[in-house]
Amino acid sequence: MAKLSINGRAVEVDVEADTPLLYVLRDDLKMNGAKFGCGLGQCGACTVLVDDKAVFSCMVPVSVLEGRKVTTLEGLGTIDKPGPLQRAFIEEQAAQCGYCTAGILMRAEGLLRENRRPTDAQIRERLSANLCRCGTHNRVIKAVKRAAEYLRTAATTDSNRT
Amino acid sequence: MGCLRHYPLGRGGRGDSGLSEARCDARGNMRVIRGLLIAIAALGVIVGGYAWRSSFAPIDRPQASSFPVENVKAGAVLAAIGNCATCHTRDGGAAYAGGRPIVTPFGTIHATNITPDPSTGIGGWSEPAFIRAVREGVSRDGRHLYPAFPYDHMAKMAESDIKNVYAFLMTRRAQVSASPANELAFPFNIRSLVAGWKLFFLDRGGFTQDASKTAEWNRGAYLVEGLAHCGSCHTPRNVLGAEDKSRAYAGADVQGWTAPALGATSVAAVPWTGERLAEYLGKGRSPQHGVAAGPMADVIGNLAQVPDSDIKAMATYVASLAGAATKERQERGARAIARAGGEGAVTRPAAAAAPGASVYAGACAGCHGEAGRQPLDPALNLALSTTVRAASPNNLVRVVLGGIGRTDNQPGPHMPGFANALTDKQIGDLLEYVRANFTDRPVFAGLDVAIRKARQ
């Protein structure tokens, strides 16, 4: 039995200790945001956040997650109410086939949680762990910067309110 | 000069300033060293102004076209063997434009700009001035250079090779880039002290052929002992920061990484041979030993430009350092290979219940194999990894945290880092399990400290 905290929700799943988080998300919890790509930490399609940092969920056994906070794509927003990154990716049309996009969104989310004003170089360096073969890379960079702007604007608006 | 040593600062060496302190034998002996240095300097002065060196007049920057193309090409290969670009290039900076900080317990030295810019680089250096700098560690203007520049090795270079490196550097694009001033504490900021250091530790004899050995071995010895300066990292230092020749190639700590022993004290599961070393130096990987990471990855990247004959020569010489493996040692190696190759990854029942076992199964086994299943190429079988067998856990910890990136000549799959996925405790559990399961070596000493330091 593994105890997990996913998008703020406590869940218990009956799996072996060495089961990768990705399998638990997709097979047991039916959360299909994280994608299976290579299963070897090479492509980044399975990226989620653990304690606000990007990890390859295909290589994270559930045994290491007790007491830690997992954030998946489902935690960023919904179709009706997309989060800032999701909104920015739609507006910039930063996806083509879209298979890698879930992982890219999560790694970008990890970056924006550390740095609300990333440079192109910082975005490129960080996202180099995520493979995309379609080639929307330049739009991805624009979208991450747009999302950063939304977050900064929201922060300013919030502080004006208080 | 204590730890004023050559620290190759590769991608893996970034941002770990301060780590060198713990590695330096000299730290607790600072006062003794200061006294010794002052005494040595005084001696130098007494011995007739030994410390004073003349200045070579600056020249107009030579036309690039004045250097024959074949000399420039030869110089490019030599500069790659010397790993010059690694120290003389700052992160994200232009090649050879200097500025990389080299942190020592005595302060920070900044690598110099060796592009031909007349004001901030070596554009005003004549060929004789360059030759003197390489062989004697003296700047064009007569100042002594700190032995962070490994002229104790370069002194073995043939003059024709130094001239070719000069031709290569003087035909690079000039970069206007002044290195920051060194930040060295008194008395290490007095350059004339280096003159005293050289009296003891700079062998000006040049390279001597050993007629009893093959031409290939001699070529390898010339490169390894000279230009390639392998001992700068792989030989431990004495209290004054010079290589301890009585422990040549016994391994040493560099930038938080451990440069493993190359000689008879190597803990490799399988004894190295010239063929395996050539494979490692050429491709950055030997399946029966390990994969280059940290500062060595930069060395391998540079060696991609070097002809196979020189790689093979260096490998032949390095393999000879350990001497021929005994029959017992060879048999032990053969058993290790047979076991690793026959049954998938090694498993020991005693280790299976360890808390790290499930971490290995979930995070590592996919690539590194498990009982009944061999590792996926190019992942190592950990039972054969020298790093897993090493006395210090430093390299293993750094590889698990940061992964192993692709080197220039090694495209394809690589090892991802686990710094975000695993906590310090989980990494400790994992490595204790890996050590117990895959080796017959004692438990790691100082694992917790190594993990904490590598995280910084």
Image: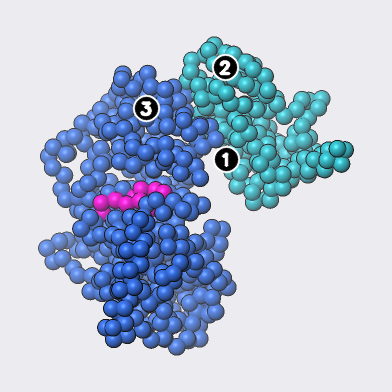
Chain colours: A cyan, B blue
Judged from the image, the secondary structure of the residue bearing numbered disc 1 is: loop
Q: Are marks 3 and 1 on the same chain?
A: no
Residue A3 - label = 2
Quadrant, the N terminus of chain B: bottom left
Cα separation between marks 3 and 1: 28 Å
Cα separation between marks 2 and 1: 28 Å
Q: Residue furthest right?
A: A161
Depicted B253 relative to depicted A57: above or below: below
Q: Residue at 19% x, 53% y: name it.
A: B320
Under mark 2, the amino acid is: Lys
Assess disc 2: are there few (<14), some (14-19) or many (≥20) residues with their C-alpha within 10 Å of its C-alpha. Answer: some
Q: Earlier in the sequence, mark 2 or mark 1?
A: 2
Assess disc 1: are there few (<14), some (14-19) or many (≥20) residues with their C-alpha within 10 Å of its C-alpha. Answer: some
- In this rendered view, identify the residue nearer to me: B104 or B216: B104
* Chain of the residue where label 2 is placed in the rendered structure: A
Depicted B333 relative to depicted B115: above or below: above
Residue at mark 3: B433
Under mark 3, the amino acid is: Tyr
Q: Residue at 45% x, 88% y: name it.
A: B57
Q: Residue furthest bottom?
A: B57
Q: Quadrant of residue A105?
A: top right
Under mark 1, the amino acid is: Ala
Nearer the viewer's eye, disc 3 or disc 1?
3
Depicted B142 relative to depicted B266: above or below: below
Counting every numbered tag in the picture gives: 3
x and y percentages locating residue B60 in the rendered image: 50, 86
Residue A129 - label = 1
Nearer the viewer's eye, disc 2 or disc 1?
2
Find the magenta span and give its range: B249-259
